[in-house]
Amino acid sequence: MRVGVMRVLTGAAGVTLMGVGVSLLLEVRDLPGVLVWLGGAVVLHDVVVAPLVLLVGLVAVRGGVRGPVRGALLVAGALTAVALPVLLRPGKSANSSVLPLDYPRNWLLALVAVATVTVLLFAVRETRRTRRRSPAQVPPC
């Protein structure tokens, strides 16, 4: 029963957010330009991003890469996708308030954080695995 309610609420939130998106899209002055950009994003995703992600996933699975590494790759890919426009932007902007932070450095720090968490997860898993393997020391009676 609760799952059904959650699905309805999630669906209602999604429809509401789509309505907000459509209302904002109707306010755009250069609608054909935005539609071309959106179409280009779909093509870029379907022709470049999705096949690349599937290929990396296939290589990772065949290589025996475990869950935390696959999760780290997914998070790193999402961080890179979000940061890509700023990373590819050439030089400094004329207006210093447009992009006031050091985004490439922050992107690298975020990737280092993802790698660190992944290594810590592996260490915790290995520690637990080692403790399970070692026989329990029971004091003699």
Image (tube, rainbow, N blue to C red):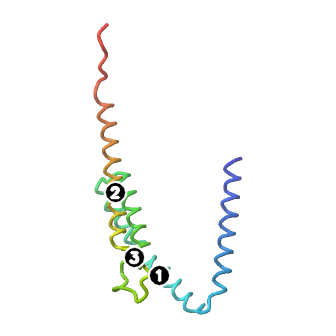
Q: Which residue is mark 3?
A: 84
Q: Nearer the viewer, mark 1 or mark 3?
A: 3
The tag earlier along the polypeptide, 1 or 3, is 1
**Tags 1 and 2 in contact by the CB under 8 Å rule?**
no
Q: Residues within 10 Å of mark 1 (few under 14, many from 20)?
A: few
Specify whether 43 is left or right of 11: left
Residue 109 on image: x %, y %: 34, 64
Q: Is residue 115 above or below residue 134?
A: below
Q: Which residue is mark 1?
A: 43
Q: Residues within 10 Å of mark 2 (few under 14, many from 20)?
A: few
Q: Which residue is mark 2?
A: 61
The tag earlier along the polypeptide, 1 or 2, is 1
Q: Label 2 amino acid?
A: Val
Disc 3, SS? helix
Q: Residue 140 sits in which quadrant?
A: top left
Q: What is the spatial separation of the Cα atoms under label 1 and label 3, in whole angstroms?
A: 17 Å
Q: Residue 52 sits in which quadrant?
A: bottom left
Q: Label 3 amino acid?
A: Leu
Residue 8 on image: x %, y %: 70, 58
